Amino acid sequence: MKYFMRDWYDEMQVSGFLVFPDTKAEWDENLAYYEEEGIDIKQVEKENLAYIKEDLLKFLPESFHTYIYNGTINSEYPTPKLREMVDQWQLKFEERMTSKRDAYRKSYESIKDSLPENVIKLHENSLHDAKVTVVERPSDDVLVMILDCRGGFHYFTDIRVTFLGVKELIVPERLTGSWWLYDEVYVKEKGFEYYVLLDNPLQEVKIVADDVWIEELNPSV
């Protein structure tokens, strides 16, 4: 089971989309600000809705669909009915996300002792917001990734991650230039199964391997 991959991320974007000012006065102040700045906020919101429309229809109940199709879900200050619908959906969403995080944490702790030491290190020293700069396949059973972690949460330099004994690899055509978002790990016989969610563009990577090696590189390399 995958917990924190594309569907999870897409639904988080829906949750972030469904955030409104607390009062009509705040809504009007925002409109006035954009008008003063010469920004066509109606066009901006129309484009924002078009970008996320497919996910809104996928993750929100049918009761929301009229607001999505006619554009009022983000072009008008929410009616009490719509706000109540959003509040109820957000509450259930947070409950599901908490349950999912707890379930993954329990799953990970149950397998941690069976994972190679460096796999634990890779997973627990977050690579969130690291940028993939180089991808190499020196052989069929080796995958090398160099990541710039200066804007991330750990290492703060370039690192080389070498997956050894690669048995299965599902990657998009282009990894270079992608940003590391989230990852999760599972035990496989004589190895591990690693999933990574990348952005720019949003895509998933699956790696089944025996071990991994992590090297910190000189920033000038």
Image: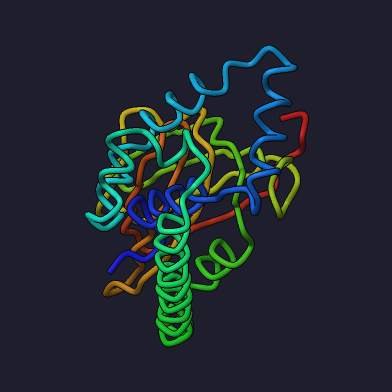
Q: Is residue 120 above or below residue 206?
A: below
Q: Residue 12 location, x and y as percent?
A: 45, 54
Q: Residue furthest top?
A: 38
Q: Residue 94 location, x and y as percent?
A: 48, 70
Q: Residue at x 40, y 44 (%)?
A: 143
Q: Residue at x 38, y 28 (%)?
A: 174
Q: Residue at x 32, y 37 (%)?
A: 53
Q: Residue 1 location, x and y as percent?
A: 27, 69
Residue 71: name its quadrant: top left
Q: Residue 10 location, x and y as percent?
A: 39, 48
Quadrant where the C terminus lies? top right
Is residue 144 in sight in this rendering? yes
Is residue 164 in sight in this rendering? no
Left or right, residue 110 beside residue 216: left
Left or right, residue 221 beside residue 18: right
Q: Nearer the viewer, residue 20 or 175?
A: 20
Q: Residue at x 30, y 54 (%)?
A: 59
Q: Nearer the viewer, residue 59 or 108?
A: 59
Residue 133: name its quadrant: top right
Left or right, residue 145 beside residue 124: left
